[in-house]
Image: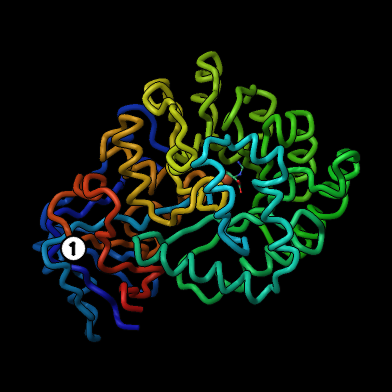
């Protein structure tokens, strides 16, 4: 592939800065270059500057080879979104739950009646790996079309050895067909499946003694996730899962404080890459989180879809110095959206994040939430050529035009992706 020059960019939002998650005021500093240009080669970003500087670029001058030029037509360019929390390995949408909730049932009530996560289990257990992979590929394609270039993808609707492994294999197969980057996570500890209802200890043993070792040995996932919630697992159980993950060389992350309060301290000891949802995190624990390297990943798509009357307290977290990321939480039960632009809109309107803060949270801090901050999340020389081009003049429009897809072109590790693909 010849080198690629992106030019005629009204605002090049680079997010260049310290090699650490952005906190406090830094979150709003997105390092814009007006009338910018980006040069990529071999799947990496080679140089970044103004269009003028690019005309003098040593690489371009010394590259006697042909350079492909992409005219961004005065649009805005961002690092590709890093969607650091998704559950794409499912068989079907949950339309019955959807109607039940519209009629007034809560997420917890539906779960207690056997709906919710449990109703997706049969679908995944009965699905072929190939059909799951097709569903995941479709989601990844939509994501790329909407500017997302890195995706974390969890299993978690199989909940037995065979179906969790099948889900992770499907994620791997879909990842191999997609030019972006997929980070797989084992979420065997999503809920206790029905056949283990009265034997939860045994299910935990299955996760720790069989699932985690097998997944680690076969390198099917980089992280292990646990749903810490009254209707799922408690913090002692989560600690067991985390300790096992660590022993097997896997990173950790958790769903916590989504529906009810819980303490994050018992988990922070394991230095999880990220703690997600965080709707009910207590004020007293914010300093502890702020001191840690753990990112708080907020997923307002779930609040929106469950019609929650509250959203995570993003302002409090940011002002306390906690590193905050944003993700879709794409899943059939609580957040059926693949669109990070929609998540930015929610973050701004419902959580009072500024558009600049929302962009940092959806790019560089998402990268840190996956421990990929050295490769992803900003447009800087040496990083992967993951870039999204938007047909707007001002970056704030990306959070403003609610529900549209404004992304016209995406580069995934240097590969050009357009909406028609
Ligand atoms: O992130 N909270 C747990 N997991 C998902 C929901 C899963 C489901 O309902 O299918 C979430 O919201
Ligand atoms: Fe989730």
Q: Position of residue 95 (x, y in %)?
A: 55, 55
Please state which of residues 21 and 113 is positioned toward the viewer in this rendering.
Answer: 113
The reply, left or right, for residue 104 in relation to residue 419 is right
* x 69%, y 50%: residue: 187
Vertical relation: 355 (above or below) 380: above
In the orientation shown, which residue stands out farthest toward the left?
52
Q: In which quadrant is the N terminus drawn?
A: bottom left
Q: Could you classify mark 1 by the number of other residues whose Cα lies within 10 Å: few (under 14), some (14-19), or many (20 or more)?
A: many
Point out the quarter of the image occupied by ligand 1: top right
Q: Residue at x 61, y 33 (%)?
A: 256
Q: Quadrant of residue 221?
A: bottom right
| Closer to the camera in the image, 368 or 94 | 94
Q: Left of 60 or right of it: where is 296?
A: right
- Name the secondary structure under disc 1: strand
Looking at the image, residue 118 sits to the left or right of residue 82; the answer is right
Above/below status of 316 relative to 361? above
Quarter of the figure that contains the C terminus: bottom left
Q: Is residue 62 above or below residue 75?
A: below
Q: On the rendered structure, is 49 left or right of 156?
A: left
Q: x%, y% of residue 340?
A: 38, 51
Q: Residue at x 34, y 61 (%)?
A: 146
Q: Nearer the viewer, residue 54 or 230?
A: 230
The residue where tag 1 is placed is: 37
Examine the image and state in which quarter residue 69 appears.
Answer: bottom left
Residue 155 image position (x, y, % from top left): 66, 56
């Amino acid at each position: 592939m010849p080198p690629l020059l992106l030019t005629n960019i009204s605002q090049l939002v680079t997010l260049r800065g310290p090699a650490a998650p952005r906190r406090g005021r830094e979150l709003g500093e997105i390092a814009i270059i007006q009338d910018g240009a980006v040069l990529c080669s071999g799947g990496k970003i080679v140089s970044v500057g103004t269009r003028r500087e690019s005309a003098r670029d040593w690489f371009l001058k010394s590259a006697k080879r042909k350079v492909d030029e992409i005219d961004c037509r005065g649009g805005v360019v961002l690092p590709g979104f890093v969607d650091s929390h998704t559950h794409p390995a499912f068989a079907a949408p949950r339309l019955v739950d959807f109607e039940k909730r519209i009629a007034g049932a809560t997420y917890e009530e539906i779960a207690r009646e056997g709906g919710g996560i449990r109703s997706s289990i049969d679908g995944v257990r009965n699905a072929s790996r190939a059909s799951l992979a097709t569903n995941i590929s479709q989601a990844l394609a939509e994501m790329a079309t909407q500017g997302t270039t890195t995706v974390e993808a969890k299993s978690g609707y199989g909940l037995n050895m065979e179906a969790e492994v099948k889900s992770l294999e499907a994620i791997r197969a879909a990842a191999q067909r997609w030019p972006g980057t997929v980070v797989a996570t084992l979420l065997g500890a999503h809920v206790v499946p029905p056949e283990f209802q009265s034997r939860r200890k045994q299910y935990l043993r299955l996760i720790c003694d069989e699932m985690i070792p097998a997944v680690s040995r076969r390198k099917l996932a980089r992280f292990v996730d646990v749903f810490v919630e009254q209707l799922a697992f408690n913090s002692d159980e989560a600690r067991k899962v985390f300790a096992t993950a660590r022993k097997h060389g896997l990173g950790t992350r958790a769903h916590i404080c989504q529906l009810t309060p819980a303490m994050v301290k018992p988990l922070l000891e394991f230095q999880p890459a990220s703690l997600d949802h965080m709707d009910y995190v207590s004020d007293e624990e914010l300093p502890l989180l702020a001191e840690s390297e753990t990112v708080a990943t907020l997923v307002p798509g779930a609040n929106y879809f469950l019609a929650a009357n509250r959203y995570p307290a993003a302002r409090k977290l940011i002002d306390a110095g906690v590193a905050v990321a944003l993700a879709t939480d794409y899943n059939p039960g609580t957040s059926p959206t693949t669109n990070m632009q929609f998540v930015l809109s929610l973050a701004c309107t419902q959580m009072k994040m500024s558009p600049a803060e929302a962009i940092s949270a959806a790019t560089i801090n998402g990268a840190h939430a996956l421990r990929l901050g050295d490769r992803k999340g900003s447009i800087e020389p040496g990083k992967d050529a993951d870039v999204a081009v938007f047909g707007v003049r001002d970056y704030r429009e990306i959070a403003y035009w609610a529900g549209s897809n404004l992304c016209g072109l995406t580069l995934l590790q240097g590969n050009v992706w357009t909406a028609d693909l």
